[in-house]
Amino acid sequence: MVRAKAARGSQLDGSSEQAADEWGPFGRPLFDDPSARALSRVGVVDVGSNSVRLVVFDGAARSPAFFYNEKVMAGLGDGMVETGRLSPEGKVRALSAIRRFQILAESMGITPLTAVATAAMREAEDGPEFRREIEAATGLRLFVIDGEEEARLSAQGVLLGWPGAYGLVCDIGGSSMELAELRDGKVGRRVTSQLGPFRLKSIKGGKRALRKHIKDVVTELQETFGAQRDRLFLVGGSWRAIARIDMERRNYPLAVLHEYRMSRKSLLATIDYIAESEIEDLRLRCGLGQARMALVPIAAEVLRALVATFKPHDIAISSYGIREGLLYEQMPQRLRDRDPLIEACRFAEAKDARMPGFGRRLYDFILPLFRSTPDERKRIIKAACLLHDVSWRAHPDYRHEVCFDNATRANLGGLDHRERVFLGVCLLHRYKNSRTGSPFEPLFALLSPEELREAEIVGKAMRFGAMLTVQSEDLMGHLDWFPKKKRLEMHLAAGAEGLFGEVTEARFNTLATALGAETRVIRPKG
């Protein structure tokens, strides 16, 4: 029922000079230049038991963005338990999707694609035959990975977004479910099981028999892993659908699934809510597809058993999985060690800001206001400074809204929902003094009054500092902040007194008001 394997390193060494066809599922080397921050477009096809998906990555190498993302709910594994073969209809839909993906990739100039397949393709009698059919029809070489490798790649996908993550990664597909440990930013033990909804549909004896079967398997998994009381990372479409339902039940204001957090109590309440609801009505309210929703009630019972057995500290949704794990696999350690949030913001600044590079100087300029701020918060402030000018093309009346919207909904890793909103409020106040009457007010409730005040101060400090945008760092002058005396000082640089004009002074005073401080402007002598 459960197969386990000890942790191992990469299957392939990215520095070797093997022929292209020997790279296996990891494709050609992507990161030959470890100093490169930009990632050329790379396409990955994931042929799962339920869905077939093409993702094209672009952007910062350490924090790739989804340039293109399309899936087809082919249902290859549907009925495989009874027949031992792939779904005939699923094969037609999957082949059609892959044909389309290959044409799209050629038009984007990103062939060859990296393509992997999981449980249905590796276990079906006609899996090898269908694999050959795909290659003959499209030229796409499909690599079938085993369950333990699937678990490892999913866990590495989590590491792409959460460097140094710890806990248990659970990836559910249509025909299998994988678990992998994360400790100190590395993948540990991992197992594969047959707890996929397609398989569980065949369990006879009703809901009681289904729950007993699931509990028995999960108990065996728990005996394999031992205590796992840290974070439970959930990877897979069924888990994301359950999280979407949790958001609907709670009337949660931010519809971003990646890094969405749930407590055990909230999640168990949502699982009961699913069991008690009319499924079609729930599907429509949550905007879920029929094929996905059909598997949710069974997946919810698996999750109930996982949470009850492992008792994680909390639960987090990861939109990163196998596909992102394939990228992480090839990253040199120097690239893996970078902060994904900061790398993404640096990339955005270099691409879109009027004066790329000024974000670092702006951060250094306002840093005296935040000397005692924890490092975890300082990195969000640094991200805000890097992003402070990337939305300048928006209409002036709406820049504050565009900034907030981008920060809270952008494809960014390395920050949770509260940090997203904090970042958004910082950037909102970069362009607007007041947030009263904002359409984003429901999201502000995710922060405490103290956090909102701190974000406002960051924004107003950036708003003031942006008035000193000059090529030479020496001309910016510097700030001094005396929190006990509640005094804010601006030291003007020699030869740059003219920068401190009427509007600049007004913004300086607005910042001081937010701090509850008196002001002092110190001009150069002579």
Image: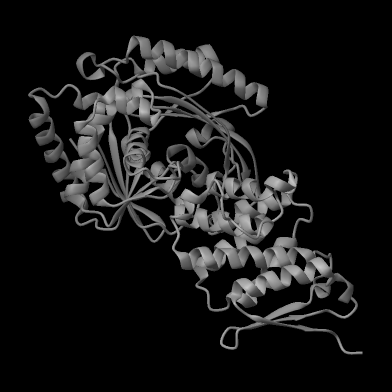
Most extreme residue toward the front is: 437
Q: Residue at x 19, y 55 (%)?
A: 226
Badge count:
0
Question: In this rendering, would 76 be left or right of 508?
Answer: left
Across and down, in percent, residue 138 comes to 54, 15
Across and down, in percent, residue 346 comes to 66, 55
Q: Is residue 34 above or below residue 25?
A: below
Q: Residue at x 22, y 25 (%)?
A: 199
- Quarter of the view holding residue 269: top left
| Nearest the eye: 407 or 184 | 407
Q: How is the image coloured?
A: one colour
Across and down, in percent, residue 188 comes to 33, 53
Q: Residue at x 83, y 65 (%)?
A: 470
Locate the C terminus by quadrant.
Answer: bottom right
Residue 132 can be seen in this image: no
Question: In this rendering, would 344 be left or right of 259?
Answer: right
Locate the N terminus by quadrant.
Answer: top left
